[in-house]
Image (cartoon, helix red, strand yellow):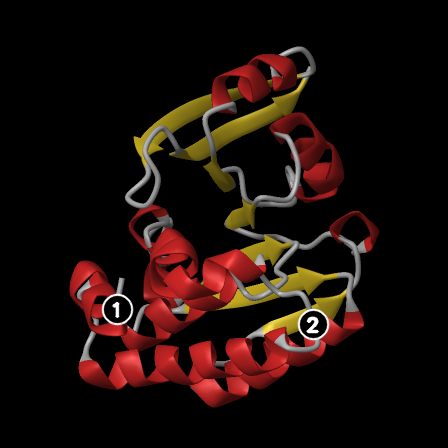
Amino acid sequence: MTAEAFAAAVDVSRETLRRFEAYAEALVKFQKTINLVSPDTLRDLWRRHFLDSAQLYRYLPPPGGAGVPRVLLDFGSGGGFPGLVLAIMADAGNQPLTVHLVESDARKCAFLREAARLAGVRVEVHNARVEDLEAFPVDVISARAVAPIDKILAVIQGFIGQGHDNLSLLLLKGRQSGEELTAAGKNWTMEVESFPSLTEAGASILRLTDIRRD
């Protein structure tokens, strides 16, 4: 997939595409010294990473009343997928979204700050593990290829019930999502919605809501 094909697929302007191109250039540059993405995916960067992340945008909750921004927490952010991509999409669409990127590797945090600067978007980067953060109210938590669902719920449980009863969890998952949901159901109850991935046959986007520990 080319950059232009990506722009057409997610319906962004040429100006917004230039922001993504600056981000992509930074990623390729930093990749030479930091393992931000799997090296064999660089040849298909626009589909495997940018489109894969951008497809979550439609599943974000709507903005709050009176311009109150939605708050997104993305953990295991690594190269910025999907959190930084969603920040750019929201900013380009004038949709208020406060984005927190959580990454335990300090070098990756340096990349995230630089990529955000080049893309002209404001994000908060936390150099920490998500389970070590002091919890604060968030509307949506996103994660991509970090852990099975039961382990994800275990590390974010401090954020569940922090004043936002409508908290949703957006996950990009492969073919094993059914097995992961079954395992998570042993200790948690939740409402589950599944949407087909645009980038990989058999993969899915999961939106979990009304999450409660049994």
Kind of element beneath mark 2: loop
Kind of element beneath mark 1: loop
Q: Residue at x 56, y 47 (%)?
A: 143
The quarter of the displayed image where residue 53 is located: bottom left
Q: Amino acid at mark 1?
A: Thr
| Observer able to see residue 45 | yes
Q: Which residue is mark 1?
A: 2
Q: Amino acid at mark 2?
A: Ile
- The location of residue 114, given as percent across then percent down, is 59, 85
Q: Residue at x 52, y 22 (%)?
A: 190
116 horizontally vs 105: left or right: left
Q: Residue at x 19, y 78 (%)?
A: 13
11 horizontally vs 150: left or right: left
Q: Residue at x 43, y 58 (%)?
A: 49
Find the residue positioned furthest to the right. Answer: 132
- The location of residue 52, given as percent across then percent down, is 38, 52
Q: Which residue is mark 2?
A: 34
- The location of residue 119, given as percent across then percent down, is 44, 84
Look at the picture and state if 108 lies above or below 197. Answer: below
Disc 2 crowd rating (10 Å Cα; few below 14, some 14-19, many 20+) is some
From mark 2 to mark 1, how far is it between C-alphas? 24 Å
